[in-house]
Image: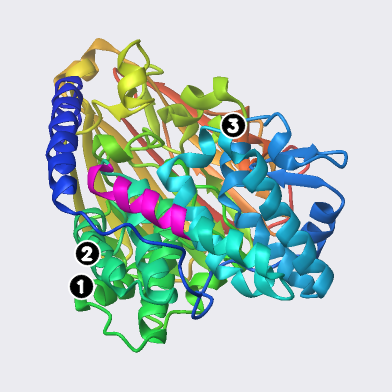
Amino acid sequence: MPQTTLASLLGYGARRTLDRIVATLRASLWRRPAAGIPHRVLFAPETLAEADAAVAGDIYAGVFALAGQSVDTGGRSPFSADPPSEEWAVALHGFGWLHHLEANATELSSTNARALVDEWFAHASVSEVAHRPGVTAERLLNWLVQSPLLLNGADPAFRQRYMRALGRHMRRLERTLPSQPRGMARLKVAAALVVAGTSIANEQRLARWALGILGDVVAADILPDGGHVSRSPETLFEALAFLIPVREALARRQQAVPEPLRECVDRMLPMLRFFVHSDGALATFHGARPLPPSTLEGAFAYDDVGGAPIENARYSGYQRLAADRTVVLLDTGVAPPPPFAGRAHASALAIEMSHGPHRLFVSCGALGDLREEWTAVGRATAAQSTLVVDDTSSARLVSRWPLVRWFGPTLYAGPTAVDVRRSALTVKAAHDGYVSAFGLTHERRITLGEDGLALIGEDQLIGQDRLDGRPFAIRFHVGPEVKLKIEKSRKKVLLVLPDGSIWLFAVDQGPQIAVEESILVNAPYRARRTSQLVISGNTLTDDTVRWHIARHAQPVSDDA
């Protein structure tokens, strides 16, 4: 994957403008006769979401807890409330919460669902967020999925309003799709149109047209190993949440699923398993939130093959070491291309480690989801479990006006390449993200024991400039439930897990260990204070640091 530089970002902006002009010209060739109200919904598409009766109760009470923030509407329409954040507004207008009302599938549930949809009809025109293509695609899909809930006991007037709204959504997305720039919104729009064209009567032509575009999107955005080009585990899950309903809808109408699409989903599901830790939740690289096992099970329920995760995801830029109850993930990739780097982190050679239900080493995660001012901090190298030279990130964020307006907080100027060598449970990797600034290459070697009870690591800075005496720090952010007890020598730290088990972290020689404060996202839109182990050194005297962590069988000593 090529390096993203500032020059390439500017070049991407020009290409994007040209692509939109060409796409608009192509769209003018796609003219369909004006369509009336769709006749009927043939079936409700599949969804990966699970209904929660507790959330349904909150909605009935007028409380909408979305994107980490809760709004009590006080009996008013949620669509007339002032959104506490853009993310909250996106979630509200996407209607992903509607499926919770299905937890109690009663006539009252249907009545409440219809009332909320009618409220959207009355207030949506004032919201710019509501009519963004990606949000419109989510709403169209969710309304179709919940068509039984919405239409159960509905009077003819609501049925007409509902079907007319489906038609307007489809035509709007149909006009938007050809000129939609590359990104997740393009995949969502194409997928939603395929599902709508398949599940609504007399819309097969629309489905075939959108399916052709979706095939091109998938071919460009899904990597050969099944990962998403963004390199984000959560974005991979989000893509599956749209592609699986496409596959299932086509099968429901007894239509052939295009082989490239079928093979793509078959690759993506094992890759999603690749990112699952031993606690069953998702890894948090590149802005991913730690989605719980119950959320991921919705996708794995559609895994007919049940393929085991690969170990070497070289296209996605990751390595997975697994033994018994231990999982170690290592980031060995470069920054994703500009359309997908808006949430990417400077995490070259960062690790995450879990054992059983516990996370030992973690990334701080998407701190920007909690507070906007934390965005740059959470995406910096220091917020990952890896080595940092002179408190400088291995990649940078676009932050200056007007570039940030054009591209958003895009990650760029990171490593151009990562050299990876693997043998069984040993991985050796090196990145050049510090060569241009400091003339240094960071090399990390890790080996997981066959029983999963020990991880041996070595971090080295290579290059003539190390003689200039550059300071560095190797950071290991620990899980929020892990308690630390540092020994007086400051060469060893005991990690005490909630189940009482003890792990020993130590450096073999060189600098000492310090314990510092940290913070991480431990659940979607929720943060928790934690700690980090920091090994600080100088390239003049400590160019190589050897460390290890192992399950400790001895009781905690009194001098710890």
Q: Earlier in the sequence, mark 3 or mark 1?
A: 3
Q: CA distance from mark 3 to mark 1?
A: 40 Å
User: What number is the disc on residue 126?
Assistant: 3
Q: 485 or 324, which lies in front?
A: 324
Kindly report which numbered mark, 3 or 1, lies closer to the viewer in this rendering: 3
Q: Which three-letter amino acid code belongs to the residue tagged 3? A: Val
**In the figure, 514 relative to 96: above or below?**
above
Q: Are marks 1 and 2 in contact (CB under 8 Å)?
A: yes
Crowd rating for badge 2 (residues with CA inside 10 Å; few <14, some 14–19, many 20+): some
Residues at circles 3 and 2 in contact by the CB criterion of under 8 Å: no
User: Within 10 angstroms of label 1, few (less than 14), some, or many (20 or more) residues?
Assistant: few
Tell me, yes or no, whether the highlighted magenta stretch contains residue 400. Answer: no
Which secondary structure type mostly characterizes the magenta part of the structure? helix
Residue at the (31%, 22%) spot, across then down: 406
Which stretch is magenta? Answer: 167-180
Circle 1 residue: 260
Q: How far apart are the alpha carbons under marks 3 and 2?
A: 34 Å
Which amino acid, mark 1? Answer: Pro
Q: Secondary structure at mark 2?
A: helix
- 275 in relation to 434, above or below: below
Q: Earlier in the sequence, mark 1 or mark 2?
A: 2
Q: Earlier in the sequence, mark 3 or mark 2?
A: 3
Task: Say which residue label 2 marks.
Answer: 215
Q: Is residue 326 visible?
A: yes
Exactly how many numbered labels are in the figure?
Answer: 3
Indicate the position of residue 2 as horizontal and vertical percent values: 14, 38
* Tag 2: amino acid: Gly
